[in-house]
Image (spheres, grey):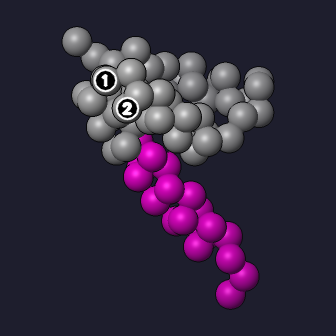
Amino acid sequence: IEPPHLCPDCLCKMRWTLGFDLVARYEGLQTFYKKAGMPVEARWVERRLRECREGLAEAGAASAPR
């Protein structure tokens, strides 16, 4: 069974419409999953957070002035 998360397309549409911070959303979900005793979901969010942070770092490096 997969965790109850949005697919990438739906997540992108929701972010565009609502304008929320993706990293903050995942941090909140991770806190909730840990407190709720949902370790599988907490680990999934931990991986997504790492991927998001790496992607943001790469995007920042690519847009930095040379």
Residue 19 falls in image quadrant: top right
Work out whether 14 lies above or below 62: above
Decide whether residue 10 is among the magenta residues.
Answer: no
Q: Position of residue 20 (x, y in %)?
A: 72, 34
Q: Which residue is mark 2?
A: 34
Residue positioned 72% across, 82% down in the render: 65
Residue positioned 61% across, 29% down in the render: 12
- Dot 2: few (<14), some (14–19), or many (≥20) neighbours within 10 Å? some
| Magenta stretch bounds | 48-66
Work out whether 21 lies above or below 57: above
Q: Amino acid at mark 2?
A: Lys
Q: Is residue 62 left or right of residue 41?
A: right
Q: Position of residue 2 (x, y in %)?
A: 28, 17
Q: Which residue is mark 1?
A: 38
User: Can residue 7 be seen from the camera position used here?
Assistant: no
State the SS at label 2. Answer: helix
Q: Position of residue 3 (x, y in %)?
A: 33, 19
Residue positioned 52% across, 41% down in the render: 27
Q: Is residue 66 left or right of residue 38?
A: right
Residue positioned 39% across, 21% down in the render: 36
Q: Amino acid at mark 1?
A: Met
Residue 61 falls in image quadrant: bottom right
Residue 59 falls in image quadrant: bottom right
Q: Which residue occupies the foreground of this view, 41 or 52?
A: 41
